[in-house]
Each structure stands twice: as C-alpha cells, then as structure tokens.
Image (cartoon, coloured by chain):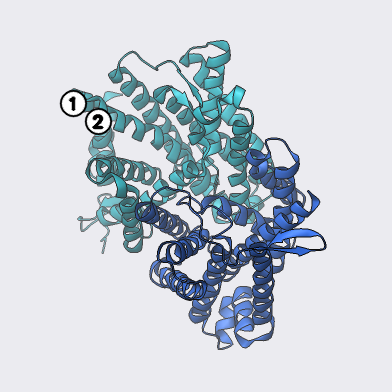
Amino acid sequence: MIEGIIISTLVRGGVYALLASGFSLIFGMAHIINLAHTAFFMLAGYGMFYFMGELGLGIAPAIAITVPAVTLSGILAYRFLINPIREHLASVLLMTVALAMAFQELLLQAFGAHYRTAPALIPGVTEILGIRVQNQHLLTLGVVAVVILIVWLVLTKTKLGIAIRATAQDAEIANLMGISVPRTLLIATGIATALAAVAGILVSPLWLIYPQMWMAPLMMVMVIVVLGGLGSIKGSFIGAFIIALVETLVVFLVPGGSYLQVAFALLAMVIVLVVRPGGLFGIVFEEERL
Amino acid sequence: MLRRLLKDFRWGLLPVPGRLIAVIFFVALFIFPLITNVPYYLSIIIFCNIFVIFAVSWDLLSGYSGQVNFGHALFFGVGAYGSALLYKYLGWQPWATIPLGVLAAVLAGVVTAFPALRLRGPYLSLLTMAFPLMLLGLVFAFTNVSGGEYGIGGLPRLAATPIGEYYIILIVMTVSVLIMWKLTDAGSRYIRTGLIFHAIREDEIAARATGINTIRYKLLAFVIGGFFCGLAGALYSHYTRVAGPSTLLMTMSFQAIIWVIFGGIVSIYGAVVGVYTLYPLVEILRGIIPGYRFFIMSVIVIVILLFMPQGIAVWIRDKIERECPRCKLTNAAWRRECRACSASLH
C-alpha cells in the first residue's frame, strides 16, 4: 500500500504541479484568476482521445497536433477575449468562466456526456526494486520532471525568463527597461497553456475524460496555488505535492475517502491560510498588511 | 403623506428614466399573473425572483464590500438544507423552517467570515470557495442524514396554488431587494452602511484611518449576504420541494458571479437585470435548441462582455442617464440642461 500511495502521490502531484505553475504564472504576470485554465487541460485530453482513440493516429502526430492547437487557442483567447477588457477585473473573471463553459458545452455536444479514456501512450509494466509500476506512470513522472526542469531553466537562465519575472514584479518598470509587456504577457500565456496541454496529454490515459472534468482539477489547482502563495512558482510545485499527498492518503486510509478527498484537501488549505494568510511562499507587500 | 408621495413621483421618479423603468418593471411583475396563469411562465418568473435574491446578496457581499466570494452557494445550500432538515426531523411548516434555515445561513456566514477576515483579494475568494465543497463532501459522506445524491424531498409547498406561491416569493423578493438597495445606497442620509462598504472596498486602510471599524463592517457584510442568500435557498427548497446537493455545487456559486457581472457589478439593478436576462434566455433556448443552450448563453456573455465590459445594465444606464456636473443630480441623457440647477450637461 505504501508504494501505491507514493506512486499515486507523485503522479497526481506532478500533474497538479504542471497545472498550478501555469495558473500561477498567469496570475503573477497579469493578475488574472484564470478559471478557464483547466478547460485547456480538458481540451488537450479530448484532443488525445480524438486523435488517438477515434482517428487512430500514432502518439507522435497526436501530440504534435494537440499541443500546438491547444496553445494557440489559449493565446488567441487571451489576445482577443481577455486583453481588450483587461482593466475590468470582474469582467475578466466572468470572461474566463464563460470561456470554460463554452468549451464544456461544445465538447458535450461533440462527444456526448460519456466517460472516456485515451489509449495508453506506452503500455506495459516495469519492475523497480520489486514493485510493479505501470510504464504510463513512469512516463508521466519523467515528463513532469523534464518539463519542470525546462520551465525552471527558462525562467531563471534566459532573457525571456528574466523578462517574464520582471513583468510579474512590476510591469511599469519592466516596460521602462525596454521589455515589451504585452508581448511578454502573450508568451507567458502561451507557456502556461502549453503546460496545461502537456498535463492533459499525460493524464488522458489515466483519468476519465468527460465534459465536466475541468472543475475538479481547477478547484485543486486554486487550492494549491493559494497554499503555495499566489504567483510563486516554487510554492505551486511544493503545494501540488502536499495536496496530492493529502488527497491520496485520504483515499487510501479513510473509509468513504473518495467523497471526502476534496473536503480534506480544502481543509489543508484553510489551515494553511489561517496560519499564514499569504500562503507558504507568498509575497505579502508591506502596504497590504493590516 | 399623499402629497409627499405625489411630489416624489412628479420630481423624483418621472424625470429619471432608470427609476421609471424599475418601477414599471415591478408593477409589471405584480400584474403578470393577471395576464397569464400558465404555470410554466409563472415558474420561470418565480425562479428568476429566487435567483434575484441570491444574486443581489452576492453583489452586496462581493461587489459592495469587495470580498469576492467564490462560494456563495454555501449560504444557499445551508438555507435549503437547514429548512429541509427541520421539516424532515421535526415536521415543522415553512413559516417556521424558513426563518431557522436563514438563521443557519447567517451562522454559516459568521463561520466563513472568521478565517476570511484575515485574508484579502484572491486568497479570500479561494478560501470561501472551499466551504461549500467541504459541506458537499459531508453531504455525500453522511447519506442517511442528508439523503445524498437525491437530497431531502417531499417538502411542503409555500402556498396551495401556483399564484399564491408566485405572490409570496415576489413580495419577499421585492422587500429583500429594497432592503439591500437601501443598505448599499451610498447617498443615504440615514443608513451609513452603503457609504462604509464603498469606503472599505476602495481603500481599507483609509477607511480604518477615518475611524471605521472595518472588521465589524466586513463581518456585517457576510451576515447580510448570508441572511438573504439563505432566504433564497430556503425559498428555493420549498418551491422545488427538494433540497439537493445541486444547491452546493461550484456551478451554483459561479452562476451568481455570471449573473451579477453580466448585469453590472456593484449595482443592485445590475444583478436584477442579469438574472432576468440570462435565466429566461436559457429557458427560451431550451425550447428551441436544447443541446446548445448553455453554449449559446456563454457565447452571448462573451460577446456582450467584449462590447460592454462593465455589464449590460451599467452600459444601458450610461446611455439613458447623465449626472449633472455641478449638482450631481441624475438627469435623463436627452436633456440639454440639468433639471435642478440648469447647468449645461454637455
């Protein structure tokens, strides 16, 4: 059971980490609570299901179509729907909800309300230290590790990453330093959506795909991001694994746990917030302290 | 008294198109059953009225006091489940269960407020989002008490006939909206809460510096929001005669956000317009193309937001009303001079 808990926590935590870091990136840069973030994740899941399950394409072409398509739709949505009303924060919030609902209803009409899964990306099992692990889980862990490493390197080592972090800290000063803020925002949105797309591809053979599948992860992502501190990418990585551990422990150990896993994860968030109102790694500005 | 009313009507109501429309709207609602008594149309209006209370209470809490609540369904569900449980275990009638359900929702508001008072901005939104979902987990975990998936059914009706129910809910809605409108009216001479809520939303530190106990007023906002939202929930459970888990879903909380922001946040009439536009729209679409009704609704919301980012009611108000630059009196937009001080409006 211990190995089950560990593997489940790592896989779940990895997927949450990809989703939460994208959410956190958008929030940190543009101060948008993007409720449509997991809708793109769902879109990628459906993309894999459609291209691999229905059309029978191989893994490589399916991924090669899904990731750019989802990323492009995220960038277009940001550019043409969110950007024009950026100064009205409440309207942006509603816009993201409406967008997510539009995707949900469109997928409901296109594929019906059935529970589906995509075929496994790599089938089979491997034995590590006497524990049988599905290759699919190993692949998920590997991809998550690589993607997290790439995001880390991009954010810390490249000029683009410095521009992104500078814009997140202070958009006006970043603008004065010659960084094109709108372009940086657009690129950051693209990165965040691409992360969501990768997460969607990874879970497509593991989790059920259905038109409401964006809601539960969205909630968890928000919990994680708040737990780790809004806008802090490090916080969202660590928060993702904490929440995944809590969820897995509740499912494995508490009777009737699958109903209560959300409640316990939320309880963990409430406790963290009551103890540390800025999250674990959140930045509390001096002027906001009361 | 009568002369005063007549004076108000002549000088306060007729020259301001927004107020005139509001009064005509409420009069139309009161005479609606005389025109048609098709139960389907009545039920649409009844649901609209219940959701108006729900949406306006969200607007009061989130729009006016600035504590954006992502879990408003908590109060709705507590009101619904509270009154349903009282009926199930004690067999009480609606006139007793609804006030107690409302009281339970107020308590839920206070409980939510205690951790929420320490937080602000997005943190507060996401914390409040947690509570209805935690309660939902409990509802599914203890199915013998809550009825689980099916909820608690067989609640007594509010009145014997649909028309009776219509008038009860309409009167409750009118009174609640009037009370909430007065409580949030920043220009009121007697009730200061509206002004204080505005002050807290705009700048909490400045509000504190002027001697306002902001904690007390933020708590008050939660209590008022919980009160009216619980009322809506209790009415909803007695009208549909079942209190189910759907009252606690995240969709329900988002529903309030959609209606209010679509109509125009921080305006009571915005919430009313939002509900009365979107809810009947979905019902009409159900008759035409049932499969795509929510898709079309969300596309309409997206398009309207692109052109009227402040909300549809605020956009219309700005088209038909103009504030006098000198004496701040509201005028019809087609007047050239202010009706009181005859300053030029252009």
User: Which chain shows up in cyan?
Assistant: B
Name the kind of residue labelled 2 in the image: Tyr
Residue B230's x, y, as percent? 51, 30
- The residue located at (58%, 46%) in the rendering is B129
Name the kind of residue labelled 1 in the image: Thr
User: Which image quarter is the N terminus of chain B in?
Assistant: top left
The answer to which of B260 and A256 lies nearer the viewer is A256
On screen, B15 above or below A144? above
- The residue located at (74%, 55%) in the rendering is A242
Colour displayed for chain A in the image of the structure: blue
- Residue A215 shown left or right of residue B316 in the figure: right
Marks 1/2: CA distance? 8 Å
Q: Which mark is residue B36?
A: 1
Secondary structure beneath dot 2 equals: helix
Residue A41's x, y, as percent? 52, 62
List the single residue furthest toward the left.
Answer: B35
The answer to which of A137 and B201 lies nearer the viewer is A137
The residue where tag 2 is placed is: B41
Label 1 packing within 10 angstroms: few (<14), some (14-19), many (20+): few
Residue B276's x, y, as percent? 31, 41
List the single residue furthest toward the right.
Answer: A129
